Image (cartoon, grey):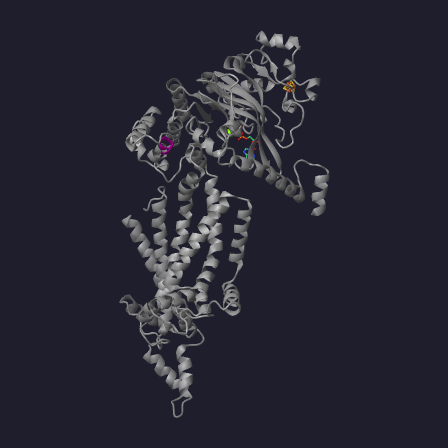
Amino acid sequence: MTKYLLKRFLYSIFIVVFGSLLVYSVLRLLPTSYFEKIALERAQAPGAPSYAEILSSLNKIYGMDTDIVSGFIKWGKNAIQGDFGVSWEYSIPVVEKFKQVIWYSIFLNIVTLLIQTFISIPLGVLAARKQYSKTDYFVTFVSIVCISMPTFFLATILKYIFSVKLGWFDLFGIVGRYYEQLDIWGKILDMAKHLVLPVTTLAMLNIGGLMRFTRTNMLEVLNADYIRTARAKGLSENVVINKHAFRNTMIPLVTYFSYLIPNMFTGSFITETLFQIPGIGYISYYALIHGDIPFAMFYSVLIIILTQVSLLVADFMYAVVDPRVRID
Amino acid sequence: MTDSIKTSSTKKNPNYISASESRKISSENRRITDALEKKYNRKHVPESEYLTTMKDPNNTVEFDDLHTYFFTDIGTVRAVDGVSFAVPQGKTVGIVGESGCGKSVTSLSLMQLVQRPQGQIVRGQIRFNLGDKAYDIAKMPGNMMEKIRGNEVSMIFQEPMTSLNPVFRIGDQINEVIMLHYPEKSEAEVRDHSLHMLDLVGIANPEGIYMRYPHELSGGMRQRVMIAMAIACDPKLVIADEPTTALDVTIQAQILDLFRNLKEKINSSIMLITHDLGVIAEMADFVVVMYAGRIVEKGTANEIFLHPAHPYTVGLMASKPVVNRKVDRLYSIPGSVPSPIHMPDYCYFRDRCDRRFDMCNGPYPAEFQLSDTHKVSCYHYRDGAASNRALHNNGFEILN
Ligand SMILES: Nc1ncnc2c1ncn2[C@@H]1O[C@H](COP(=O)(O)OP(=O)(O)O)[C@@H](O)[C@H]1O
Ligand code: SF4
Ligand SMILES: [Mg+2]
């Protein structure tokens, strides 16, 4: 157990270090940089020093005048102490910005997770129980539609129907125009209303896959010999499905859910951007396209670390639901 | 592409069917199985619908002209096609035949565990004697069947490695069946009962095994657990479907010993399906020989072993492994079984039979009676074919 953890830990460190070095190198090598843009702007001001002068002084101030490796080492030294620097784009410490926006993403993802789980798992089980029935075909059809739909397309359709045509929801944003004037319940309701379309989009994107995943696993489990044994005992079909089959179907599902952990903290890039939900996905998107290296580094390292954690959690969860699996 | 499909279907090659044919078959199947499933899933069915009377009250179960078909996309598989035999109370009936001949489907029909919805009992009766009354299992709805399964009739399967649920402890899995059928028992009583069962099937350390998970046990141990579960509720009939086939030879012997012991200790009837004719000879009171979904010969163990009549039975006996003589395949009778989808109307064994004669081109032979208990479906034993019957009854050894 300790040996396993240690091995896993060293392995993770290795991945985190080289993963962030890779990201850092790519960011440094981007053909356009944040400072080039700034320098270009400042150089146009009357009486300003030349573009090249401004650029080199900016680079010096922000430590971008070094080569990639020493720049990375410098960044790493600070990062280990929890100092990720000040975001260039947002002009406040990176961690500060993260704390401000992360809750939107967590909330969005938890609600989505609950909704998609409560819709897709029962439907997947039902489809498996009634394989090749009308219900099954319907579920399969819906899954395939959901799986094949690109986010931007789905979001646009939903916006068109529910915002433009029906006018039920705002097109984007997390709060309405009169948010500040509302009482506490009004504020909650207002935010909830703004989350309906993003949650629907995200849920629909995942429901298809999760439904098929559940159905496939359930079908496999239902063909297992121990299910026949359970039936041979005289157990009712509901007990057979909900106790004997479901526990076994859970085994692969647990991994699936463990992989969703990083999602929770990394936000949903596309959906948040499309709906302009100021979560971590949306904020990072702008940091990235503007070449905000401190923020981009923080975000990437976060993803890498969380992915490692989720792998560990998945292993643990496997051992929890499947007695055949031992962690060692 | 379309052309080639067309030609193959117009030629009526039984190995190919076109996509449209398959679609037609499957929608027709859907119609048939939906109706049967609806009937099976009804909630409130008057008992009178499946109440029946035994032909002989001394029998535990009577199969009467049982037909169990699988409605598949390539056609109807007649897995069991008119099987009739009885299991007398407290007796052991052995069922033999090559794999695929319908032994498992016959026993699964009795449990109502044939794979739904494609597998269905389409005709015939399975009369089950509950002592004070008898039910026709073929007509029983699902929710009533749950009271019989595991309680009055139970089954031990071929694959002990996969037949126990991997995520539950052994103890819990045995407790489950006891709690289900004896709801009045307290938790402690259920536990004691389970431990007693583990002890009964020769598990040396019941308390230890009680807490184990299936994967921590060997195949032989798991099969013992399966047996403990099967006899836990003192059923009237235990079906053992090739209970040792998947095990090592030494373990096989132990499990068979256990069966022999249990036969004395429990008063259930046993339906024993096995490849091992030696076991049948030793344990069975009656033997049923199946071939391609039908019974070709049945009788007491003595009759079948000392006076096998059907050429197929004779072949089986000849291919029985003898001590010091290794046989690679148990049933090495040349030729193959007709496709269960396109059964011809002549003796199914004809193409492999070394005793066929002109009559064998006629329709499938009826069942001819050699004694009160001994019946065979072969034209050599037709009524009036005195010479053969006389010869046979005098102990004519076809083998020699
Ligand atoms: N689920 C199924 N679907 C279609 N055909 C089946 C199914 N189960 C069994 N059969 C067919 O039924 C026949 C009898 O099978 P079975 O009773 O398992 O044979 P065995 O005598 O070896 O136990 C076989 O021809 C097999 O192909
Ligand atoms: S009826 Fe004819 S073909 Fe069939 S087993 Fe008897 S002799 Fe052989
Ligand atoms: Mg079988």
Q: Position of residue A41 (x, y in %)?
A: 42, 85
Q: Position of residue B203 (x, y in %)?
A: 33, 27
Residue at (65%, 14%) from the top-left corner? B382
Snapshot quadrant of residue A32: bottom left
Q: Main secondary structure of the magenta part?
A: helix
Residue at (46%, 64%) from the top-left corner? A197
The answer to whether one can see residue A67 in this image is no
Q: Which residues are magenta?
A: B176-180
Q: Position of residue B155 (x, y in %)?
A: 44, 28
Q: Quadrant of ligand 1?
A: top right
Residue at (35%, 60%) from the top-left corner? A305
- Does residue A55 appear left or right of residue B93 in this picture? left
Return the residue nearer the eye: B49 or B374. B49
Return the residue nearer the eye: A176 or A34. A176
Q: Is residue B219 above or below residue B30?
A: above
The answer to whether one can see residue B27 in this image is yes
